Amino acid sequence: MDRKISGFIKQYNLLSKGCKVIVGFSGGADSVALLSILTDLGFQCIAAHCNFHLRGEESERDELFARNFALRRNIVFEKIDFDTVGYASIHGISIEMAARTLRYEWFEKLRLQHDAEAIAVAHHRDDQVETVLLNIIRGCGLKGLTGMAPENGYVVRPLLCVSRSEIEDFLDSRRLEFVTDSTNNETVYLRNSVRHELLPLLERYNPSVRSALLRMSHYMEGVEKVYDDAIDRGKKEVMPSSSEIDIDRLFREPSPESLLYSILSRYGFSPAVTDELFNSLSGSSGKVFFSPTHRAVKDRSRILITDKNAKENETFFIENDLCSEQLPFKMSFTIVDFDGDFATLKSLGGAVFDMDKLVFPLTLRRWKKGDFFVPFGMKGRKKISDYFNDHKYSLLQKEEAWLLCSGCDVLWIVGERTDDRYKVVKNTQKMLHITLD
């Protein structure tokens, strides 16, 4: 089996010869086989054991076994204790998801600490079959049918080329001991139910169902590459920028719904939300859809994608020394004596204000509901939101707009209209000239 796994590592270029590797080591059969084989193949292994404290004395037994196994073979041993239940409760996630998150975050910290090339985990062919079935049950897309990749970032899976029975034969031939997780037989967990109930049922209809699923998964890897290439070309056609989708162009594509799903899934949008958004494209603008990290807005002829984190709290202060180094974009400030020649003001560009009317520090911030100003050349005040609507601002443009303020008053919709109350007048002595780079 060593030769088979060595060939698999070379085939997928998973590990460099003799490199340092963090090995997820529970003490179970799969991880014992992985650690033993990688050590035999000459890799510098660090055995990383997580105690999730979910199984009482059994968790302590596993930790003791893992520690002794590594020490007897002069393998560096690292371990960590997790309050898995507490973490799951705080973050509102399942115990399984909490354990997975905690495990991989710690593995990555160890990888950096030990300057290791990769993190090796012990998933094998039978795990791959179960993963594909689980993905199908959950309603996966094409990606889910490919199962687990041999390499995903720094995580590698050298045992994907061997089955559980091959691992057991290997352990038996080497007389290697391991511990057994008693919860592996509890069908309350979906994966265990798939392993102990669904797969045996499918094998009654097709004794070779495991091989069939693996062949399908391997075939889908190639299909996914073709699909991804088509999606990338489609994205270039329908996305004039990384934050917007042209709806007219989208509907000119062979499968607009599939293309939209593929684009939005990369921003964390669920299939249900994507379906709802797609069905809204023929309706009026303004409807907003959310993923955990982003939002998508149906805005006239476009879908606008923005970061979910609101920007309204972004505020910068400009003291009377007029330092602009901390500002989000370059603004130049110059105090100029006014000679009474209004004709020269038009040639200056940017914006000018009566210096004596300003209250420092000036603030540069995002617009808020209820903001108003007195547009230059007018006497009555106007809501900023009405100004945006009159000038057909998209929701994204509204969110990106900046206001320069003096006290509570809006001086300038930056790059647009200034406020009439702060304009240069006949008796102005000094004026503040602001330009944008």
Image (cartoon, rainbow, N blue to C red):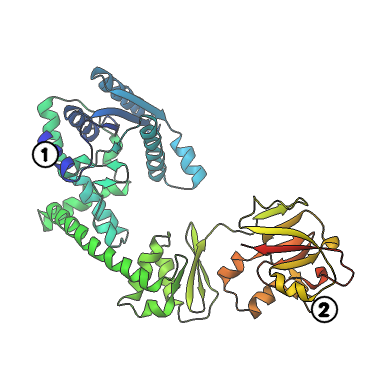
Towards the viewer: 71 or 85: 71
Q: In the shown orientation, is residue 316 left or right of residue 283?
A: right
Residue 94: give x, y in percent of width and height: 42, 46
Q: Amino acid at mark 2?
A: Lys
Q: Classify the position of the C terminus by image quarter.
A: bottom right
User: Can you tell which quarter of the image residue 134 is in?
Assistant: bottom left
Q: Classify the position of the N terminus by image quarter.
A: top left
Q: Which residue is mark 1?
A: 4
Q: Which residue is mark 2?
A: 379
- Residue at image point 46% right, 69% down: 244
User: Can you tell which quarter of the image residue 31 is in?
Assistant: top left
Towards the viewer: 16 or 154: 16
* Marked residue nearer the N-terminal end (1 or 2): 1
- Residue at image point 47% right, 66% down: 243
Residue 113: give x, y in percent of width and height: 39, 30
Q: Secondary structure at mark 2?
A: loop
Does the image show residue 353?
yes
Q: In the shown orientation, is residue 200 left or right of residue 152?
A: left
Towards the viewer: 431 or 368: 431
Residue 432: give x, y in percent of width and height: 77, 62
Does the image show residue 1?
no
The CA distance from mark 1 to mark 2 is: 83 Å
